[in-house]
């Protein structure tokens, strides 16, 4: 983060998202402000709250992708949740605090991976020693001078065998290793909202009381190295330290992306409580404002988690959200609808551009495919036309167009043998023009 200035963040986002410059600028500032806050002295640091962002725009224009790429840039714990999946506390369904608990689980896994990398070398060495002891077990009978001679011979053989293990000469050989098979108590809890973790927590608490059985597994030496290395990593890693770092990471750098927030906007139902709309807004409010959430790893404070929300707001407006929640998303970013020129750039420029993806897929069959400039322009124009005539699904329309265009080619590819395929603008017109102009057919296919 020290090197990621707002301009560099925007440049990094440009590799994957076309256009939406205002949105990129806003999220880049929000991300940099988190780094700035951590350099501020106490007590003012605790008073600096994140500028939560609400993104407004049609589907398929890059709202989710901006949030996801931003989290990867910052290497922050990130979770995307759908606002429509939650219900008001007291009703059957997921409660809003579960988003924080899920974020903690993600952070634990991230920190565990980092810790595993730190002990990778030591774990490999320990795993090799365990494997060698299995291949050349110690003598349990001989003692005295004879036993010492046998042990010295064993050590010499062990050293030679170690070199063969490292070089991979023995990878295909089969060996039996023992792994612990932990039996978990059969406890099932029918929990209400907010208690879904109890079914997991109780068995973990009783785990040490249950007998641990050892189970023999016949595997190749190559598989045994991986299994034993993983077991050694888990032994070397201090899980208390991992948990502590994960909770700190969530509280300081965590990002929660609430999608489809427009679906919970609007007043309550006239026929009774609307448990998935205004009630959910009221439940989200304290978490966004800053509260303490109980997780099985400890209490997590949400005061400095960055919340990003997004919605198309076709049938509602951001002002339909309850005023308190609106106030907690002070930064509003408008995403504009994509043009035919944007579609052309999306097909070619991003690191994960569709044309690059299909080129790689075709190459896996020993063939090559080439799209002319006219073909790219025609695909973009078709996608734009279909979006205007029917539902505007943004850049996702390019997937449907490309799938329809290349359907026959991809079907026949394995039987056609190595060749070069050229896609021209004329080919695109011939394949898609009839579908695009026929409304009924277009609705069915595109």
Image (cartoon, rainbow, N blue to C red):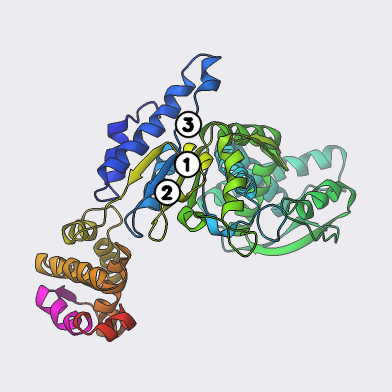
Q: Which residues are magenta?
A: 419-435
Quadrant assignment, res 180: bottom right
Residue behind mark 3 = 50
Could you give the CA–CA distance between mark 3 and mark 1, rounded to whole angstroms? 14 Å
Horizontal side of residue 264 vs 380, given as left or right: right
Q: Position of residue 371 (x, y in %)?
A: 16, 68
Q: Position of residue 179 (x, y in %)?
A: 75, 56
Quadrant assignment, res 124: top right
Compare marks 3 and 1 and give the one earlier in the sequence. 3
Q: Nearer the viewer, residue 218 or 368?
A: 368
Q: Where is 429 relative to 118, above or below?
A: below
Residue behind mark 1 = 326
Quadrant assignment, res 300: top right
Specify whether residue 425 is painted magenta: yes
> Helix or strand or loop: what does disc 2 sit on?
helix
Q: Could you tell me which quadrant the C terminus lies in?
A: bottom left
Callouts 2 and 1 close, C-beta under 8 Å: yes
Q: Where is 143 relative to 278, above or below?
A: above
Residue behind mark 2 = 318
Could you give the CA–CA distance between mark 2 and mark 1, rounded to whole angstroms? 7 Å
Could you give the CA–CA distance between mark 3 and mark 2, rounded to whole angstroms? 20 Å
The label number, if any, that marks residue 101 in the structure image: none
């Amino acid at each position: 983060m020290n090197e990621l200035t707002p301009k560099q963040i925007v440049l990094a986002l440009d590799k994957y998202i076309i256009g939406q410059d205002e949105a990129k600028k806003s999220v880049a500032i929000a991300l940099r402000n988190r780094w700035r806050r951590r350099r501020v002295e106490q007590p003012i640091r605790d008073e600096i709250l994140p500028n939560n962002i609400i993104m407004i725009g049609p589907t398929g224009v890059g709202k989710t992708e901006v949030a996801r790429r931003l989290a990867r840039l910052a290497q922050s714990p990130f979770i995307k949740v759908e606002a429509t999946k939650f219900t008001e506390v007291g009703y059957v369904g997921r409660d809003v605090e579960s988003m924080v608990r899920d974020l903690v689980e993600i952070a634990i896994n991230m920190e565990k991976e980092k810790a595993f990398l730190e002990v990778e070398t030591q774990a490999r060495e320990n795993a090799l020693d365990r494997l060698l002891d299995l291949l050349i077990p110690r003598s349990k009978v001989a003692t005295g001078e004879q036993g010492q001679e046998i042990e010295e011979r064993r050590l010499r053989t062990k050293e030679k065998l170690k070199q063969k293990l490292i070089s991979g000469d023995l990878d295909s050989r089969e060996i039996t290793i023992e792994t612990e098979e932990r039996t978990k108590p059969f406890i099932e809890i029918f929990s209400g909202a907010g208690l879904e973790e109890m079914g997991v927590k109780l068995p973990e608490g009783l785990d040490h009381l249950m007998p641990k059985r050892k189970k023999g597994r016949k595997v190749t030496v190559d598989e045994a190295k991986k299994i034993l290395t993983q077991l050694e990593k888990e032994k070397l890693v201090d899980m208390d330290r991992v948990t502590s770092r994960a909770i700190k990471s969530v509280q300081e750098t965590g990002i929660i992306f609430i999608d489809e927030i427009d679906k919970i906007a609007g007043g309550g139902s006239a026929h009774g409580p609307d448990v998935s709309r205004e009630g959910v807004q009221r439940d989200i409010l304290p978490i966004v404002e800053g509260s303490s959430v109980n997780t099985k790893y400890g209490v997590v404070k949400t005061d400095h988690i960055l919340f990003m929300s997004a919605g198309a707001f076709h049938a509602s407006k951001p002002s339909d959200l309850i005023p308190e929640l609106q106030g907690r998303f002070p930064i509003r970013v408008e995403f504009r609808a994509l043009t035919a020129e944007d579609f052309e750039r999306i097909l070619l420029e991003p690191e994960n551009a569709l044309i690059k993806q299909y080129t790689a897929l075709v190459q896996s069959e020993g063939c090559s495919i080439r799209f002319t400039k006219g073909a790219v322009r025609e695909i973009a124009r078709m996608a734009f036309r279909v979006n205007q005539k029917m539902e505007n699904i943004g850049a996702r329309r390019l997937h449907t167009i490309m799938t329809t265009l290349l359907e026959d080619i991809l079907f026949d590819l394995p039987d056609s043998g190595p060749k070069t395929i050229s896609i021209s603008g004329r080919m695109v017109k011939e394949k898609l023009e009839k579908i695009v102009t026929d409304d009924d057919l277009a609705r069915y296919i595109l």
